[in-house]
Amino acid sequence: MSSINPRPDNSAESHEAQRAQLESLETGQIPIIFDAKPAVRIPAEIWVLLSATFFVAIGFGLIVPVLPQYTKTFGVDELLVGVVVSAFAFMRLITSPIAGRLTDRFGERTMYSLGMVIVAASSFATAMAGSYTQLLIFRGLGGVGSVMFTLAAASMVVKYSPPQLRGRVSSMWAGMFLIGGISGPFIGGLLAELGITVPFVAYGCALLVASAIVAFALRGPHERGAKDKAAPPMKFREALQLPAYRATLIFGLANGWAVMGMRVAVVPLFVASLVPDEPWVAGTVVAVGAMGNVLALQWAGRASDRLGRRPLIIAGLAVAAAGFVMYALTSELWFVFVASVVAGFGSGLAAPAEQAALGDIIGRERSGGRVLAAFQMSQDAGQILGPIVAGWVVTMFGFSWSFAMGAAILLMALLAWVPAPDTLKRH
């Protein structure tokens, strides 16, 4: 019985492959055949978290332009208005360690939903506050719930993100908050036309929707609780031994100080000093900075998954510091817009890579509530101290020195990352 021979392949590629195989056999080497693997996809759990984050971001943006005006209706001065605004961040700061321990003990989904409900109740109570003291207490309680669901959300993003896509997921998560920061204030201003307390009620409703999404969509087969319990939570002392984590804590302080603190508190005052009678200009400068952030987020996360976290973090910090130096060197409005774009672009380069690096440090198999809490504390501390110290420097020495200090803080974080190893493990 004759055998059927396949038709010979006389292509150049076929001859080259046969020659390489013969050479490997002659030298005693075993040729390695790589099988194509299916592309890694973003898990369904991540899409659930992103959907919930959209409602959180929009809701928080609703009350940003309204809270100072609402506080003024209680007949207080600007100092007490600032106290109410800072109370939220202050309570986040002091309760972060407790929230981290609770996350490790009771699980992310439980703490996420509980934190959401607390902030929603705080928002409803804020709308019904009868005095300044009540308003201060209700806003402070909101900070407690905020840090609970923030840490739980960050922990779930770490857990459910494939390592190969961690930078991309971090970029998408940051993008959701950016959407809220841009569109939320506009919507909140429109809702305020119906009543100064309406945005607070809308914020509470948005939080309840986000809580319901996570509580029901991540139940059953989506949970990995049994698998996670096999490994103990990562302790803060354990993470602190890693150079990359120490650099991460310094990054959090610098990012909170300059990007999240000075950008919101000092830059608008600087613009107002250049254009005294046009308050809309300051808001436009901040919005332009957000546009620079959007431009970077388009590819920063993917780039960190290919090139590593460390190069993107160092480059982003350098660009953001350059933006603050540009603020310090100009008194021209058009150049302020350019500086705002540069600073925003640098922030967009570094932030997703830093978040992905933090996820690399913790890993998917362990809970890292305390580790995440320490990072959040460093960022909140910078966000509280940055505007205060920068405001004092402006009063004593002027805006240029204040912006130079912000650039120096960012460069400090850059220098901390230079000797640290990259956290992205290449397989």
Image (spheres, rainbow, N blue to C red):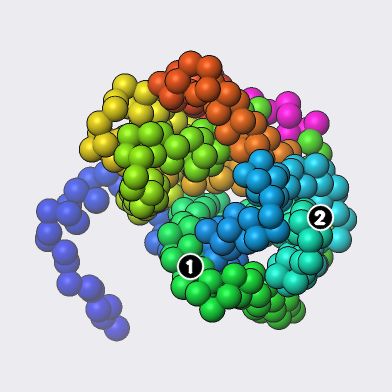
Q: Which residues are magenta?
A: 237-245
Residue ranking furthest to the bottom:
1
In space, the residues marked 2 and 1 are separated at their CA atoms by 25 Å
**Is residue 137 found inside the magenta-colored segment of the image?**
no
Q: Which residue is mark 1?
A: 189
Q: Amino acid at mark 1?
A: Gly
Determine the residue positioned at 29% across, 27% down.
331
- In the picture, measured across the screen, residue 29 lies left or right of residue 388, that is left
Q: Amino acid at mark 2?
A: Thr
Q: Secondary structure at mark 1?
A: helix
Q: Secondary structure at mark 2?
A: helix
Q: Earlier in the sequence, mark 2 or mark 1?
A: 2
Q: Position of residue 259 (x, y in %)?
A: 49, 38
Of residues 69 and 226, the one nearer the viewer is 69
Report whether residue 285 is seen.
Answer: no
Determine the residue positioned at 53% across, 71% down.
192
Kindly report the secondary structure that dominates the magenta region of the rendered protein.
Answer: helix
Residue ranking furthest to the top:
397
Of residues 81 and 242, the one nearer the viewer is 81
**Is residue 239 found inside the magenta-colored segment of the image?**
yes
Q: Which residue is mark 2?
A: 133
Q: Position of residue 384 (x, y in %)?
A: 65, 37
How many marks the image carries: the answer is 2
Of residues 237 and 351, the one nearer the viewer is 351
- In the picture, measured across the screen, residue 342 lies left or right of residue 95, that is left
